[in-house]
Image: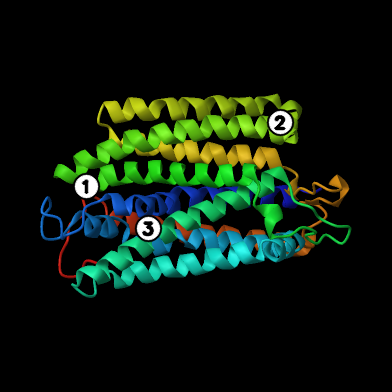
Amino acid sequence: MTGLQVFWFTALGLLLTGYAILDGFDLGVGTLHLFARSEFSKHTDQHGERRILLNAIGPLWDGNEVWLVTFGGALFAAFPRAYATALSGFYLPFMLLLVTLIGRAVAIEFRSKRPERWWRAYWDFSFSAASTLVTFIAGVAVGNAIRGIPIDGDGEYAGGLMTLINPYALGVGAFAVVTAAMHGSMYLALKTEGQLRKRVQGWMWTSFGLFLIGYLGVTIMTLVSVPQALTNFERWPIAWTLVALNVLAIANIPRAIQRGRAGYAFVSSSATIASLVFLFGMAMFPNLLHSTAEPHNSLTIYNASSSETTLRLMRTVAFIGVPLILTYTTTVYWIFRGKTRLDDSSY
């Protein structure tokens, strides 16, 4: 194991954190989409709450997915064996993930192109279903990564589709959905006003309650089903500090909601997601894919990595490219700050 391999494991964690926080809230908005009223409701104005929700994420969602693309590219270049095994083993789920990502994008672009009620209702459902399914599939993938998958001596996936559909992975998938919904509701609290803002307040409380139930449930399932998840905490006890910070971030969410501090609630939600990704990394390190059949077949950061020359060259590229991504992201968020307003150029 070299410092370069540890560097790229950490870099993948940071990219995953960026994606989970940034695309997490717009996926959560999609999950909540059908709970908003459409323009055909007598209780709302001519624009409709659903169109406001779409425009709250409209300028941002495609840029947020850059983090996922960068994560995939970095995994392929830094740890090609793990990339090959993951994509071959999770082939059907990943193809479904790709289809739902495309369908989500199409729904955002097509939804308001025609005024017919049936047209908008169809794309509303497509957008919400795709957003929820993307989050769920990603959560199932994370659950299987933590739990482990069967890998043979050649480093290839030795299970089937049903191997991936297990109670633990499904539980993590459901937890990912409620976490995204909570995160999305707090983002909407920053972007909406009036009656819709009051309704979002209720969504925040409901989604936080579901998140808390899911958090406790997944924690218990992890301690029971994945005992190796605590190995690194025994090796480096200082890591428990992040667990404490995770609990404090969660505890601050209802406090911020109660005080009407949507910004603080969103920051706390972001910190919670970041700490969950850290806990995921601690449960995995140094494994990229843990083998349940034969632990020595696991793909780790040292037996699945590219050459040292490749890792060093990639690190140089990363030092150039990441500031560009951060600059772009910061600029877009600054330009589209404030409450959502609808005009002729809106979705």
Q: Decide: few, some or many residues near mark 1? Use Cα within 10 Å; few <14, some 14-19, many ≥20.
A: many
Q: Residue at x 21, y 42 (%)?
A: 197
Q: Quadrant of residue 81?
A: bottom right
Q: Is residue 38 above or below residue 220?
A: below
User: Residue 34 appears at what percent x and percent y?
Assistant: 30, 54
Residue hosting label 2: 230
Q: In the rendered structure, which disc, 1 or 2, sits on the residue that comes first in sequence? A: 1
Residue hosting label 1: 192
Q: Is residue 34 above or below residue 225?
A: below
Q: How many marks?
A: 3
Q: Nearer the viewer, residue 278 or 42?
A: 42
Q: Residue at x 38, y 30 (%)?
A: 253
In the rendered image, the quadrant that contains the C terminus is bottom left
User: Residue 188 appears at what percent x and percent y?
Assistant: 29, 46
Q: Which mark is residue 128?
A: 3
User: Residue 215 appears at what percent x and percent y?
Assistant: 52, 33
Q: Residue at x 27, y 55 (%)?
A: 53
**SS state under label 3:** helix
**SS state under label 1:** loop
**How was this image coloured?**
rainbow
What amino acid does circle 3 point to?
Ser
What amino acid does circle 2 point to?
Leu
Q: In the rendered structure, which disc, 1 or 3, sits on the residue that comes first in sequence? A: 3
Q: Quadrant of residue 256?
A: top left
